[in-house]
Image (cartoon, helix red, strand yellow):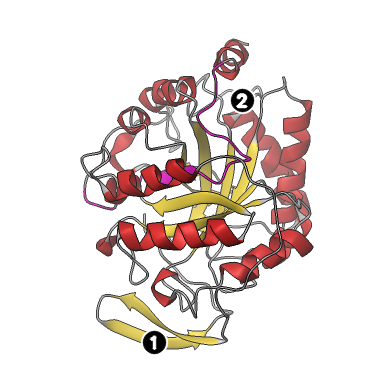
Protein backbone atom coordinates (compact mmCIF):
# COMPACT_ATOMS: atom_id res chain seq x y z
CA UNK A 1 0.00 0.00 0.00
CA UNK A 2 1.47 3.34 -1.04
CA UNK A 3 0.59 5.18 2.16
CA UNK A 4 2.50 2.64 4.27
CA UNK A 5 5.73 3.54 2.52
CA UNK A 6 4.96 7.21 3.13
CA UNK A 7 4.71 6.92 6.88
CA UNK A 8 7.69 4.58 7.22
CA UNK A 9 9.93 7.16 5.57
CA UNK A 10 8.50 9.93 7.78
CA UNK A 11 9.12 7.80 10.88
CA UNK A 12 12.86 7.90 10.22
CA UNK A 13 12.93 11.70 10.67
CA UNK A 14 14.28 13.04 13.97
CA UNK A 15 11.18 14.42 15.67
CA UNK A 16 10.83 18.06 16.67
CA UNK A 17 7.82 17.03 18.74
CA UNK A 18 8.82 15.26 21.97
CA UNK A 19 5.87 13.75 23.87
CA UNK A 20 7.87 13.63 27.12
CA UNK A 21 8.83 17.32 26.95
CA UNK A 22 7.27 20.35 28.64
CA UNK A 23 8.26 22.53 25.67
CA UNK A 24 5.80 21.68 22.89
CA UNK A 25 3.79 24.36 21.08
CA UNK A 26 0.56 23.06 19.53
CA UNK A 27 -1.68 25.06 17.18
CA UNK A 28 -5.13 24.43 15.77
CA UNK A 29 -5.39 25.15 12.07
CA UNK A 30 -8.14 25.11 9.48
CA UNK A 31 -10.85 27.56 10.50
CA UNK A 32 -9.10 30.80 9.52
CA UNK A 33 -10.44 32.49 12.63
CA UNK A 34 -8.39 35.64 11.97
CA UNK A 35 -10.13 36.05 8.61
CA UNK A 36 -7.35 34.48 6.55
CA UNK A 37 -4.81 31.74 7.05
CA UNK A 38 -1.67 30.42 5.42
CA UNK A 39 -1.52 26.94 4.00
CA UNK A 40 -0.82 24.06 6.35
CA UNK A 41 2.58 23.64 4.71
CA UNK A 42 3.54 27.26 5.36
CA UNK A 43 2.82 26.91 9.06
CA UNK A 44 4.89 23.75 9.13
CA UNK A 45 7.85 25.74 7.83
CA UNK A 46 7.62 27.78 11.04
CA UNK A 47 10.07 26.38 13.59
CA UNK A 48 7.92 27.62 16.47
CA UNK A 49 5.27 24.93 15.80
CA UNK A 50 5.66 21.36 17.06
CA UNK A 51 2.19 19.91 16.42
CA UNK A 52 -0.90 20.91 14.45
CA UNK A 53 -4.51 19.88 15.02
CA UNK A 54 -6.59 20.04 11.84
CA UNK A 55 -9.97 21.64 12.59
CA UNK A 56 -12.44 20.08 12.09
CA UNK A 57 -14.07 16.76 11.47
CA UNK A 58 -17.30 18.46 12.53
CA UNK A 59 -19.85 15.78 11.75
CA UNK A 60 -19.73 12.08 12.63
CA UNK A 61 -20.48 9.23 12.29
CA UNK A 62 -21.69 10.65 8.96
CA UNK A 63 -18.27 12.07 8.13
CA UNK A 64 -18.03 15.74 7.18
CA UNK A 65 -14.88 17.86 7.23
CA UNK A 66 -14.36 21.62 7.09
CA UNK A 67 -11.05 23.47 6.66
CA UNK A 68 -12.40 26.83 5.52
CA UNK A 69 -10.91 27.78 2.13
CA UNK A 70 -8.02 25.30 2.39
CA UNK A 71 -10.00 22.48 0.79
CA UNK A 72 -13.22 22.65 -1.21
CA UNK A 73 -13.08 19.70 -3.64
CA UNK A 74 -15.05 16.54 -2.90
CA UNK A 75 -15.13 12.94 -4.03
CA UNK A 76 -17.45 12.52 -7.00
CA UNK A 77 -21.07 12.12 -6.00
CA UNK A 78 -20.41 12.86 -2.30
CA UNK A 79 -19.89 15.79 0.05
CA UNK A 80 -16.75 14.21 1.54
CA UNK A 81 -13.78 16.51 1.11
CA UNK A 82 -10.85 15.33 -1.01
CA UNK A 83 -7.76 17.39 -0.15
CA UNK A 84 -4.65 16.40 -2.15
CA UNK A 85 -2.90 19.71 -1.42
CA UNK A 86 -3.38 19.19 2.29
CA UNK A 87 -2.13 15.62 1.88
CA UNK A 88 1.14 16.92 0.46
CA UNK A 89 1.37 19.45 3.29
CA UNK A 90 0.77 16.76 5.91
CA UNK A 91 3.73 14.81 4.56
CA UNK A 92 5.83 18.00 4.57
CA UNK A 93 4.91 18.67 8.19
CA UNK A 94 5.84 15.13 9.19
CA UNK A 95 9.12 15.32 7.30
CA UNK A 96 9.99 18.28 9.54
CA UNK A 97 9.16 16.37 12.71
CA UNK A 98 5.73 17.92 13.24
CA UNK A 99 2.82 15.87 14.55
CA UNK A 100 -0.48 16.27 12.64
CA UNK A 101 -3.73 15.37 14.39
CA UNK A 102 -7.33 15.45 13.18
CA UNK A 103 -9.59 17.28 15.62
CA UNK A 104 -13.10 15.90 15.97
CA UNK A 105 -15.99 18.08 17.11
CA UNK A 106 -15.69 21.81 17.68
CA UNK A 107 -18.24 24.33 18.89
CA UNK A 108 -20.43 24.15 15.79
CA UNK A 109 -21.28 20.81 14.30
CA UNK A 110 -23.53 17.78 14.49
CA UNK A 111 -21.74 14.86 16.04
CA UNK A 112 -21.91 12.11 18.62
CA UNK A 113 -22.51 8.41 19.12
CA UNK A 114 -25.72 6.67 20.11
CA UNK A 115 -23.93 3.64 21.54
CA UNK A 116 -20.55 2.03 22.16
CA UNK A 117 -21.17 -0.23 19.17
CA UNK A 118 -21.61 2.76 16.85
CA UNK A 119 -18.50 4.38 18.30
CA UNK A 120 -16.39 1.26 17.71
CA UNK A 121 -17.64 1.00 14.14
CA UNK A 122 -16.69 4.62 13.53
CA UNK A 123 -13.21 3.98 14.93
CA UNK A 124 -12.87 1.30 12.23
CA UNK A 125 -14.00 3.86 9.64
CA UNK A 126 -11.47 6.42 10.87
CA UNK A 127 -8.67 3.84 10.64
CA UNK A 128 -9.57 3.19 7.01
CA UNK A 129 -9.99 6.85 6.05
CA UNK A 130 -7.10 8.57 7.83
CA UNK A 131 -4.60 6.01 9.03
CA UNK A 132 -3.28 2.67 7.78
CA UNK A 133 -6.58 1.13 6.71
CA UNK A 134 -7.90 0.31 3.26
CA UNK A 135 -10.55 2.97 2.70
CA UNK A 136 -11.58 3.57 -0.89
CA UNK A 137 -12.13 7.29 -0.22
CA UNK A 138 -9.32 8.83 1.80
CA UNK A 139 -9.60 12.62 2.19
CA UNK A 140 -5.80 12.93 2.43
CA UNK A 141 -5.00 10.18 -0.07
CA UNK A 142 -1.91 8.24 1.03
CA UNK A 143 -0.98 10.63 3.85
CA UNK A 144 -1.27 8.97 7.27
CA UNK A 145 -2.16 11.22 10.20
CA UNK A 146 -0.47 11.00 13.60
CA UNK A 147 -3.61 10.73 15.69
CA UNK A 148 -6.92 12.25 16.72
CA UNK A 149 -8.04 15.03 19.04
CA UNK A 150 -11.43 15.10 20.76
CA UNK A 151 -12.75 18.66 21.03
CA UNK A 152 -16.22 17.61 22.15
CA UNK A 153 -18.32 20.63 23.06
CA UNK A 154 -21.86 19.39 22.49
CA UNK A 155 -24.10 16.44 21.76
CA UNK A 156 -24.13 13.17 23.64
CA UNK A 157 -21.33 12.05 25.96
CA UNK A 158 -21.83 8.40 24.98
CA UNK A 159 -19.35 6.16 23.22
CA UNK A 160 -16.12 8.17 23.30
CA UNK A 161 -14.22 5.81 25.60
CA UNK A 162 -15.21 2.89 23.39
CA UNK A 163 -14.14 4.88 20.33
CA UNK A 164 -10.71 5.65 21.79
CA UNK A 165 -10.15 2.06 22.92
CA UNK A 166 -11.13 0.63 19.52
CA UNK A 167 -8.98 3.13 17.64
CA UNK A 168 -6.03 2.35 19.90
CA UNK A 169 -6.44 -1.33 19.09
CA UNK A 170 -5.92 -0.43 15.43
CA UNK A 171 -2.92 1.73 16.31
CA UNK A 172 -1.36 -1.19 18.18
CA UNK A 173 -1.85 -3.54 15.22
CA UNK A 174 -0.34 -1.13 12.67
CA UNK A 175 3.11 -0.96 11.20
CA UNK A 176 4.87 0.51 14.24
CA UNK A 177 4.03 4.18 13.71
CA UNK A 178 3.67 6.29 16.87
CA UNK A 179 0.09 7.52 17.23
CA UNK A 180 -1.46 9.93 19.71
CA UNK A 181 -4.92 10.47 21.18
CA UNK A 182 -5.59 13.89 22.67
CA UNK A 183 -8.54 15.79 24.12
CA UNK A 184 -9.42 19.47 24.53
CA UNK A 185 -11.67 19.81 27.59
CA UNK A 186 -12.83 23.07 29.12
CA UNK A 187 -10.96 24.05 32.30
CA UNK A 188 -13.86 23.60 34.78
CA UNK A 189 -13.16 20.23 36.39
CA UNK A 190 -14.52 17.73 35.61
CA UNK A 191 -15.30 18.60 32.01
CA UNK A 192 -19.02 18.33 31.30
CA UNK A 193 -18.58 16.51 27.98
CA UNK A 194 -15.41 14.45 28.38
CA UNK A 195 -15.06 13.94 32.14
CA UNK A 196 -16.04 10.27 32.21
CA UNK A 197 -14.11 9.51 29.01
CA UNK A 198 -10.92 11.03 30.40
CA UNK A 199 -11.29 8.79 33.45
CA UNK A 200 -11.75 5.58 31.47
CA UNK A 201 -9.75 5.88 28.22
CA UNK A 202 -6.02 6.29 27.59
CA UNK A 203 -5.03 9.78 26.43
CA UNK A 204 -1.51 10.93 25.63
CA UNK A 205 -2.14 14.66 25.96
CA UNK A 206 -4.92 16.90 27.25
CA UNK A 207 -5.18 20.42 25.81
CA UNK A 208 -7.13 22.20 28.56
CA UNK A 209 -8.96 25.31 27.37
CA UNK A 210 -7.98 27.87 29.99
CA UNK A 211 -10.19 30.55 28.45
CA UNK A 212 -13.84 31.49 28.10
CA UNK A 213 -14.20 30.27 31.68
CA UNK A 214 -13.84 31.47 35.27
CA UNK A 215 -10.78 29.20 35.70
CA UNK A 216 -8.83 30.63 32.77
CA UNK A 217 -5.58 32.46 32.30
CA UNK A 218 -7.18 35.81 33.10
CA UNK A 219 -8.02 34.43 36.58
CA UNK A 220 -4.38 33.63 37.40
CA UNK A 221 -3.26 32.99 40.07
CA UNK A 222 -6.23 32.58 42.44
CA UNK A 223 -8.80 31.24 39.99
CA UNK A 224 -6.51 29.42 37.57
CA UNK A 225 -7.04 25.69 38.21
CA UNK A 226 -4.10 23.87 36.63
CA UNK A 227 -3.74 22.13 40.00
CA UNK A 228 -7.06 20.30 39.50
CA UNK A 229 -5.89 18.89 36.18
CA UNK A 230 -2.50 17.98 37.62
CA UNK A 231 -4.23 16.01 40.39
CA UNK A 232 -6.45 14.27 37.81
CA UNK A 233 -3.40 13.30 35.76
CA UNK A 234 -1.73 11.65 38.73
CA UNK A 235 -4.71 10.05 40.43
CA UNK A 236 -7.51 9.40 37.92
CA UNK A 237 -6.10 9.25 34.40
CA UNK A 238 -5.51 5.69 33.09
CA UNK A 239 -2.25 7.08 31.71
CA UNK A 240 -0.27 8.33 34.70
CA UNK A 241 2.23 9.95 32.29
CA UNK A 242 -0.41 11.99 30.48
CA UNK A 243 0.72 15.52 29.63
CA UNK A 244 -1.40 18.60 30.38
CA UNK A 245 -1.19 21.59 28.02
CA UNK A 246 -2.11 25.15 28.86
CA UNK A 247 -4.67 26.14 26.23
CA UNK A 248 -4.53 29.84 25.37
CA UNK A 249 -6.18 32.18 22.83
CA UNK A 250 -3.67 33.38 20.25
CA UNK A 251 -5.01 36.94 20.24
CA UNK A 252 -7.61 39.16 21.88
CA UNK A 253 -10.17 38.27 19.20
CA UNK A 254 -9.60 34.51 19.44
CA UNK A 255 -11.82 34.09 22.51
CA UNK A 256 -14.53 35.88 24.46
CA UNK A 257 -12.27 36.06 27.51
CA UNK A 258 -9.01 34.59 28.75
CA UNK A 259 -6.48 36.16 26.41
CA UNK A 260 -3.23 37.26 28.03
CA UNK A 261 -0.25 38.78 26.27
CA UNK A 262 2.85 36.68 25.60
CA UNK A 263 4.95 38.00 28.54
CA UNK A 264 2.09 37.25 30.95
CA UNK A 265 1.55 33.77 29.53
CA UNK A 266 5.27 33.08 29.67
CA UNK A 267 5.28 33.99 33.37
CA UNK A 268 2.38 31.60 34.00
CA UNK A 269 4.05 28.81 32.00
CA UNK A 270 7.32 29.23 33.87
CA UNK A 271 5.51 29.11 37.21
CA UNK A 272 3.56 25.98 36.27
CA UNK A 273 6.64 24.28 34.88
CA UNK A 274 8.50 25.01 38.10
CA UNK A 275 5.73 23.52 40.23
CA UNK A 276 4.36 20.59 38.26
CA UNK A 277 5.82 17.75 36.23
CA UNK A 278 2.70 17.19 34.15
CA UNK A 279 3.11 20.17 31.80
CA UNK A 280 3.48 19.26 28.14
CA UNK A 281 3.52 22.77 26.70
CA UNK A 282 1.03 25.28 25.30
CA UNK A 283 -1.89 24.76 22.95
CA UNK A 284 -3.38 27.74 21.11
CA UNK A 285 -6.48 28.59 19.12
CA UNK A 286 -5.51 29.15 16.44
CA UNK A 287 -2.55 29.37 14.01
CA UNK A 288 -3.96 32.34 12.11
CA UNK A 289 -4.41 34.32 15.35
CA UNK A 290 -1.27 33.25 17.21
CA UNK A 291 1.34 33.38 14.46
CA UNK A 292 0.26 36.31 12.31
CA UNK A 293 3.01 36.86 9.79
CA UNK A 294 5.10 34.27 11.62
CA UNK A 295 8.51 34.36 13.22
CA UNK A 296 9.75 35.03 16.72
CA UNK A 297 8.12 38.49 16.88
CA UNK A 298 4.59 37.02 16.85
CA UNK A 299 2.64 36.12 20.00
CA UNK A 300 3.14 32.44 19.19
CA UNK A 301 6.82 32.96 18.41
CA UNK A 302 7.41 34.51 21.82
CA UNK A 303 5.47 31.78 23.63
CA UNK A 304 7.25 28.99 21.75
CA UNK A 305 10.65 30.59 22.34
CA UNK A 306 9.99 30.73 26.07
CA UNK A 307 8.93 27.07 26.05
CA UNK A 308 12.05 26.01 24.17
CA UNK A 309 14.26 28.06 26.46
CA UNK A 310 13.07 26.05 29.41
CA UNK A 311 12.70 22.79 27.47
CA UNK A 312 13.68 19.30 28.32
CA UNK A 313 11.84 16.18 29.46
CA UNK A 314 9.83 16.13 32.64
CA UNK A 315 8.33 13.53 34.92
CA UNK A 316 5.20 13.89 37.01
CA UNK A 317 5.96 15.31 40.48
CA UNK A 318 3.99 16.42 43.50
CA UNK A 319 1.79 19.42 42.79
CA UNK A 320 2.09 22.81 44.41
CA UNK A 321 -1.23 24.64 44.65
CA UNK A 322 -1.32 27.77 42.47
CA UNK A 323 -5.08 28.25 42.16
CA UNK A 324 -8.52 27.28 43.30
CA UNK A 325 -11.63 26.00 41.60
CA UNK A 326 -15.12 27.41 41.96
CA UNK A 327 -18.68 26.44 41.15
CA UNK A 328 -19.99 29.46 39.28
CA UNK A 329 -18.53 32.01 36.94
CA UNK A 330 -19.18 35.02 34.82
CA UNK A 331 -18.66 34.14 31.18
CA UNK A 332 -18.30 36.43 28.18
CA UNK A 333 -20.26 34.70 25.44
CA UNK A 334 -19.53 37.42 22.91
CA UNK A 335 -17.69 40.74 23.42
CA UNK A 336 -19.79 42.90 25.71
CA UNK A 337 -22.21 40.14 26.79
CA UNK A 338 -21.85 38.32 30.10
CA UNK A 339 -23.86 35.60 31.82
CA UNK A 340 -23.37 33.77 35.08
CA UNK A 341 -23.45 29.99 34.82
CA UNK A 342 -22.47 26.76 36.51
CA UNK A 343 -19.07 25.22 35.88
CA UNK A 344 -20.83 22.03 34.76
CA UNK A 345 -22.09 23.71 31.60
CA UNK A 346 -19.84 23.19 28.55
CA UNK A 347 -18.35 26.41 27.14
CA UNK A 348 -18.21 27.02 23.40
CA UNK A 349 -15.21 28.63 21.81
CA UNK A 350 -14.65 27.51 18.23
CA UNK A 351 -16.82 28.25 15.24
CA UNK A 352 -16.87 26.65 11.83
Q: Is residue 20 magenta?
A: yes
Residue 69 to residue 329: above or below = above
Please say whether residue 32 is visible from this viewpoint: no
Judge by depth and name the residue closer to the eye, 294 or 352. Answer: 294
Q: Is residue 156 magenta?
A: no
Q: Which residue is under mark 2?
A: 135
Give coordinates of residue 81: x percent, y percent: 42, 34
Which element type, helix, strand or loop, lies under badge 2? loop
Looking at the image, which residue is at 70% across and 59% down? Answer: 233
The magenta region covers 13-35
For residue 273, which quarter of the picture? Answer: bottom right
Looking at the image, which residue is at 44% across and 74% down? Answer: 220
Judge by depth and name the residue closer to the eye, 27 or 103. Answer: 27
Q: Main secondary structure of the magenta part?
A: loop
Give coordinates of residue 105: x percent, y percent: 51, 54
Q: CA distance from mark 1 to mark 2?
A: 46 Å
Judge by depth and name the residue closer to the eye, 341 or 223. Answer: 223
Looking at the image, which residue is at 28% across and 58% down? Answer: 251
Which element type, helix, strand or loop, lies under badge 1? strand
Please say whether residue 344 is visible from this viewpoint: yes
Q: So how many labels did they put on this image?
A: 2
Mark linked to residue 339:
1
User: Is residue 168 left or right of 189 when viewed as pictured?
Assistant: right
Q: Quadrant of the C terminus?
A: bottom left
Crowdedness near tag 2: few (<14), some (14–19) or many (≥20) residues, C-alpha within 10 Å: some
User: Is residue 90 left or right of 174 when viewed as pictured?
Assistant: left
Looking at marks 1 and 2 on the same chain, the residue that comes earlier in the sequence is marked by: 2
Amino acid sequence: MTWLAGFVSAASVALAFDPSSSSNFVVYWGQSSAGSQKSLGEYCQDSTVDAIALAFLYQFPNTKLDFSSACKSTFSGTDLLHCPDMAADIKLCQSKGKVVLLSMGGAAGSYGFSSDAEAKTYADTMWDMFFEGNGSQRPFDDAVLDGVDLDIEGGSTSGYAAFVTQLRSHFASGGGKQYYVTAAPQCPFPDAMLGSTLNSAYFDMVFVQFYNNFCGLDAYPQGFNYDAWDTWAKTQSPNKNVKIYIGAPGSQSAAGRGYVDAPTLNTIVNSVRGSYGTLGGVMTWDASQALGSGGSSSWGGSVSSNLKGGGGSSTNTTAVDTGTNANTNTKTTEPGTTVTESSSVPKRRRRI
